[in-house]
Amino acid sequence: METRGRTDRAEWQKRIERWRDSGLSADQFAAELGINAGTLRYWKYHLGKEARGESANARKPARVKASDLVELPAPVAAVAGPAVFELELGAERKLRIPPQFEAAALERLLAVLERR
């Protein structure tokens, strides 16, 4: 196996192209190069998604930042009340945050969401 150095994206693209041209299985090709077959498959998947214009992290929820918060207009029944905030988490998921939500609690929630 190769030593544990970082291999850049361009090198992985070349390896994937050579693998495709070789007609070998991932296991066979990886063994010839002395690399991990699982890593080879991952890069094929990852670069393929990029080539199709898909997000590399399509299955993961989008990172949420405080700047992603959108203030919604107050409901008609509560025009005089404070506004509600809504976080769009991707995949048509939204999190509504009531006005009485504490700032410290919101910061903790955002920290948890950003780690995912």
Image (cartoon, helix red, strand yellow):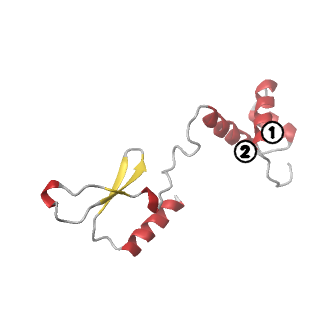
Quadrant of the image occupied by residue 31: top right
Instruction: Look at 58% across and 34% down and name the residue there.
Output: 53
Q: Are marks 2 and 1 in contact (CB under 8 Å)?
A: yes
* Distance Cα–Cα, label 2 vs label 1: 9 Å
For the question of whether residue 75 can be seen, the reply is: yes
Q: Picture coordinates of residue 49 (x, y %)?
A: 61, 36
Q: Picture coordinates of residue 105 (x, y %)?
A: 39, 72
Image vertical order of residue 39 relative to residue 28, above or below: below
Q: Picture coordinates of residue 35 (x, y %)?
A: 81, 44
For the question of whether residue 23 can be seen, the reply is: no
Q: Secondary structure at mark 1?
A: helix
Q: Picture coordinates of residue 97 (x, y %)?
A: 31, 62
Q: Is residue 108 left or right of residue 40?
A: left
Image vertical order of residue 21 relative to residue 37, above or below: above
Toward the left, the furthest residue is: 77
Tell me if mark 2 has few (under 14), some (14-19) or many (20+) residues whose alpha carbon lies within 10 angstroms of its own. Answer: few
- For marks 2 and 1 on the same chain, the one whose residue lies earlier in the sequence: 1
Instruction: Look at 65% across and 40% down and name the residue there.
Output: 46
Quadrant of the image occupied by residue 81: bottom left
Of the pair 21 and 113, the residue shown nearer to us:
113
Residue under label 1, please give it.
Answer: 30
Of the pair 70 and 104, the residue shown nearer to us:
70
Instruction: Look at 80% across and 48% down and name the residue there.
Output: 7
Q: Is residue 91 left or right of residue 30?
A: left
Instruction: Look at 71% across and 43% down and name the residue there.
Output: 38
Which residue type carries mark 1?
Ala
Q: Secondary structure at mark 2?
A: helix
Residue under label 2, please give it.
Answer: 39
